[in-house]
Image (cartoon, rainbow, N blue to C red):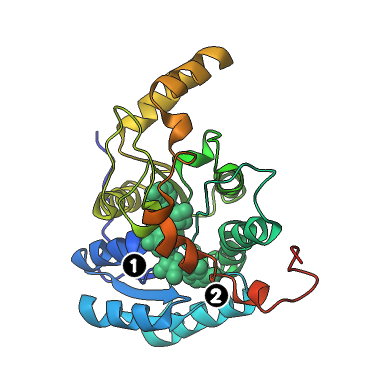
Amino acid sequence: MAKQQRILTGQVAAITGAARGIGRATAEAFLREGMKVAIGDLDLATAERTAAELGHGTVAFPLDVTQRASVKAFLDGVEEQLGPIDIMVNNAGIMQVGHTIWDEDDATTQRMVDININGVMFGMKEIVPRFLARGRGHVVNVASTAGKGGFPGGGTYCGTKHYVVGVTEALRAELRGTGIEVSCVMPVVVNTELASGLTPTRGVKQVEPSDVADEIVAALKEARFDVFVPRSVAGITKVMNLLPRSGREGLSRALKADQVLAQIDPGKRAAYELRASHSDPALEAGDPTRQLTP
Ligand code: NAI
């Protein structure tokens, strides 16, 4: 007998980095399910505009996921305005690509670690005790298929997403039997500003933010851990894992997957790269212990 689908109506969701892109689309999909949604983002002006456009009581909060106090203040604010949080989506992330590992400047490396790794860690550390206190809740971490492979030109990004996949698997194991669910979202390239100017992979269609959002909703309803977008990637990943390394790497080259993050169009990426490079305010403030590149 098919497992009964969970009903999401009335549930409270907090989504990080939801001013635009996948986070915004997820907020939209949640609202269609009748959920109450809070969006946190570093870009407060855009977050507020998005909340107003989405309507249905959506609230926007300032958030810098690189600061644990900011994550705590976000969750406190959401609970105060909307009630106890049922679903937390750790979505905020940046992708700065186009350099080899040895050519990437240290501040860029640090920024991706701060946002993509520490941001998700702070999100989990702040939400899980709240969920445990109530014996329910669902943590959704947005990783990437870059968390399942290594793509030239995106070494740090891939590394941070492998971290998210690994830590999310560990979280699932730690929370077994508590009533708290965990999901790990692994999309291919998605049509957002983050992905501007990338080389397409042969045979893998670029998906839209709404496709990712719909899969997140499905995962919440089914309490499913692995969320590949599109779903066909689950099969491709399984086949890849059965191949010897040389076969896997050959197939990746044949599909041009090795060029996705290396052969980029700098002109098309310029606006995104500029925005991303301002996404870790404390780093840019020039704190000498964190600003690694003089
Ligand atoms: P996006 O750039 O469209 O949106 C990301 C949002 O995060 C922005 O609104 C930005 O202001 C916010 N943000 C950045 N730094 C922040 C910080 N320190 N604190 C709070 N918010 C911050 O990016 P997109 O494409 O929507 O990505 C969302 C997530 O999906 C990321 O984790 C990304 O790595 C992941 N992903 C994206 C894919 C793609 O091709 N677009 C593919 C696979 C995963």
Q: Residues within 10 Å of mark 1 (few under 14, many from 20)?
A: some
Determine if the C-beta at disc 2 is less than 8 A from ligand 1.
Answer: yes
Determine if the C-beta at disc 1 is less than 8 A from ligand 1.
Answer: yes
Label 2 residue SS = loop
- Where is residue 275? Give x, y as percent: 46, 68
Please count the marks in the image: 2
Report whether residue 129 is seen: yes
Q: CA distance from mark 2 to mark 1?
A: 15 Å
* Vertical relation: 227 (above or below) 289: above
Give the quadrant of ligand 1: bottom left
- The residue positioned 38% from the left and 24% from the top of the image is 255
Q: Amino acid at mark 1?
A: Arg
Please state, as top left, top right, bottom left or bottom right, where the N terminus lies in the image.
top left
- Where is residue 64? Give x, y as percent: 55, 75
Which residue is tagged 2? Answer: 64
Which residue is tagged 1? Answer: 20
- Where is residue 53? Give x, y as percent: 21, 78
Using the image as rendered, state which of residue 170 and residue 186 is in the foreground: 186
- The residue positioned 27% from the left and 69% from the top of the image is 35
Please state if 268 lies on the left or on the right of 95 as rendered. Answer: left
Q: Quadrant of residue 280?
A: bottom right
Q: Earlier in the sequence, mark 2 or mark 1?
A: 1
* Vertical relation: 100 (above or below) 78: above
Using the image as rendered, state which of residue 212 and residue 38 is in the foreground: 212
